[in-house]
Amino acid sequence: MLETIQAAPPDAILGLTEAFKQDANPAKMNLGVGVYKDAAGKTPVLASVKEAEKRILADEESKSYLPINGSPAFGAATQELLFGPGHEVVVSGRAVTAQTPGGTGALRVAADFIAQLMPGARVWLSDPTWPNHPQVFGRAGVETRTYPYFDAAANGVAFAAMLAALREIPAGDVVLLHGCCHNPTGVDLSPDQWTQVADVIRAQGLLPLLDFAYQGFAEGLYEDAVGLRALAQPGRELLIASSYSKNFGLYNERVGAFTVVAPSADAAQAVLSQVKKCIRANYSNPPAHGGAIVTAILADPELRSQWEEEVATMRDRINAMRDLFVETLNEMGVEQDFSFIARQRGMFSFSGLTPDQVAALRDDYSIYVVGSGRINVAGMTEENMNYLCGAIADVLAR
């Protein structure tokens, strides 16, 4: 039965990492996969995380299963981080949270929830979006469509076209929005634009789903939730898939959360019972260690303060690499305007490089970039910047 099965093509992003590992060039660079790297080119374990782990290991008495929806303390800490202390959504009990295996796991729970409880609903994705979004929803049996988002000519949001498209979406469908640090473009909505989008979504009877994977990596932990707060007005409904991979550096611990904001506390509990059914039929209950780290840090004022400083350090380094990238290209005489890179936020940027130029960077310089031209700015360092910009200058001049 298995003899005729053909090998699947490599993943567009993770496949790059496999090719990168096999490359013998000592100057090779991986700017494809979305992993933060420090000035030394390493993905660090945060000091706050190491301290939290010490305390967890010292106090741990059992490795019994967590509840289906995870630790209640983790859920409470997640809601406080998302909405801020004392927010109406939290105080009213309108929000329920399930601990999930990473942000991707949260998206899959959302997809199963939509497929089972909202049959026929479609999920609308930004054009472009994270390449795994269509696969996650498609495998759950949910149809996806797209709405305009990126204006390539202006390197900004195609906002008028986006609003016009949202006004045409039928009531009952789901609109997926990137909370901040839009992946892959690095171009975000302004606070005023978020308000307008939230109003259109409410007027059209749509359900927003916020993919919130990079809180703290754009402007700040509170500032980056401006879109979430615009969507989470009294009485409004909202789905949130959040991740702790980036802002806690917990990539291999797979820590995420699926949060649902319902119209009332009673409705929220009914929704939670259905979410738990989706989880039970999938992975049954979540892993404990990563969630315990997050909970320990967010619950301890000293550890939280240390963690917030570490998030700010990562954010500042990414923004500094954006500025240095633009400056170095200018110094090398590149005529093409890359100034938009410095205005974008988060780990990723649409570079404007063509597929042929991306291939040349890989073949001639061992610089690995996604075929769309998306670059992981967090993979740049002061040490490799001249090599990178020199390579880009060469392929642009051909």
Image (cartoon, grey):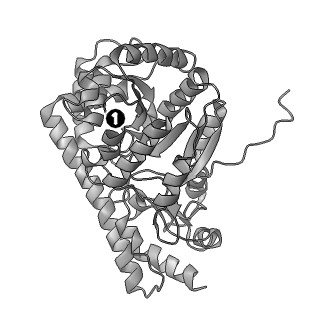
Residue 38, quarter of picture: bottom left
Residue nearest the observer in this picture, 288 or 159: 159
Residue depicted at x 57% and y 46%: 168
Residue nearest the observer in this picture, 348 or 17: 348
Residue nearest the observer in this picture, 169 or 19: 169
Residue topped by disc 1: 232
Q: Give the x, y percent position of residue 166.
A: 52, 47
* Tally of numbered tags: 1
Residue nearest the observer in this picture, 297 or 127: 127
Farthest-out residue, front = 203
Residue depicted at x 33% and y 22%: 94
| Label 1: element kind | loop
Q: Is residue 268 left or right of residue 309?
A: right
| Quadrant of image for the N terminus | top right
Using a 10 Å C-alpha cutoff, classify the residue at mark 1 as few (fewer than 14 neighbours), some (14 to 19) or many (20 or more): many
Farthest-out residue, left = 302
Is there any visible trace of residue 356 in the rendered image?
A: yes
Q: Is residue 247 left or right of residue 18?
A: left
> As shown in the figure, which amino acid type bears the numbered disc 1?
Ala
| Quadrant of image for the C terminus | bottom right
Q: Is residue 168 left or right of residue 348?
A: right
Residue depicted at x 30% and y 48%: 224
Residue 117, quarter of picture: top right
Is there any visible trace of residue 382 in the rendered image?
A: no
Q: Give the x, y percent position of residue 49.
A: 27, 37
Residue depicted at x 33% and y 42%: 230
**Residue 309, above or below 111:** below
**Residue 16, above or below 221:** below
